[in-house]
Amino acid sequence: MSTDINKILNEEVEEVELHEERVAIVDTEDFFSAMEEDLDEFEEISWNKGDGYSTPRFPMLTQHLEGFDNGLILLPAESNAGKSAIMMNIVEDMVMHEPNKLFGIYFSLDDSKHEIIPRVIAMREGIQISTVAKPQRVQNMIDKGAENADELQIELQKRQQGIDNLRANANKMMIVDSNKVKTLDEMKAYIERVINYVKALDPEMNVVVAIDSIKDILLDDHYNIKTTNEASDFIARAVKHWTVEFNILVFSSVHLRKLNGNRRPTLDDLKDSNVLVYEASVIWLLFNDVSKNKQGAKLFYREEGVDEKLPVIEFDWAKNKKSSFKGRTFAYFAPQMSRATECGIDASRRFNALLYEA
């Protein structure tokens, strides 16, 4: 009899303990309500996105992406194709558009900020980069009675206007070179500080980041990663994670090795960067026919009264997780001014037709 009682008591004790364990689990985390909370968060984020960020000078990019959103956008190209300039043009256009409420950070890990600033001013004012970089040389030419002295004087005036405009819009964008930021940890910490600063001034403001180039980011020693490929993969995952952690849009140029012949780049040319390709939301493979083939190029434009072929930059939308668009878009590029302007629909159709003829 006592054995039966003990058995019953033990079973009751075990049942009480099991019940208490279940209660403790429920008290710790309510898994059944997790989806409801996720949906509430999703609704808040979705409605707050609005139309996404837009680029007035690149309306087709905005249209084909259905508005720019947080994520990682890559611009791979060969050397001298104009990838850094294209990225700067897009980001500058984005941050200068008031409704976007964005502050831009342009990390130049290749060139110094003193090399980048003249390009930004030239791009904005439509003047020669050399005029911005070496104003005294231009002034000397004017003083010596150059035939085009009046034109040069106007260029200097536009240069000063560009300096003034850049000062007036210092709250729109900053340029950070490798003298200040070199490593992955340094870049993340810098981005976080800027976001905190911007949000403290205006909670509705956000940050857009441009990196020239992601392949130039150094990995901090404490990660103890030995090979270059492992480091590149780690950096790719980290940068993509920033877009989620900070809810930001990140652009990055990617250097491609010189391609054989006249062929255009493909995703296969990034086969040593499989993780980077995987992590990217959008990949624009850029091609500059004039840079590649000089005056033998088939994809170009000309300015009135000038025989020289000028470059048209081809955007091959090799990956696009943001919308259903697949295809190519184009931009006129003036290298001496570092300025890009999107080609309209008719010009884009004409350039696409040229590619099929080739």
Image (cartoon, rainbow, N blue to C red):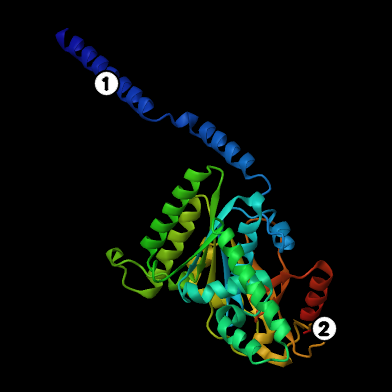
Q: Nearer the viewer, residue 98 or 223?
A: 98
The amino acid pointed to by label 1 is Glu
Horizontal and vertical percent position of residue 103: 55, 55
Give the residue at mark 2.
Answer: 304
Quarter of the image for residue 260 reads bottom right
Which comes sooner in the sequence, label 1 or label 2? 1
Q: Residue furthest left?
A: 2
The amino acid pointed to by label 2 is Glu
Q: Where 117 falls versus 92 (above or below)?
A: below
Give the residue at mark 1.
Answer: 17
Q: Residue at x 73, y 60 (%)?
A: 59
Q: Where 346 falls versus 307 (above or below)?
A: above
Label 2 residue SS: loop
* Residues marked 1 and 2 touching at CB (< 8 Å): no
Q: Nearer the viewer, residue 230 or 220?
A: 220
Horizontal and vertical percent position of residue 135: 58, 81
**Residue 218 appears left or right of 247:** left
Q: Nearer the viewer, residue 344 or 93?
A: 93
Instruction: Tally the numbered discs.
Output: 2
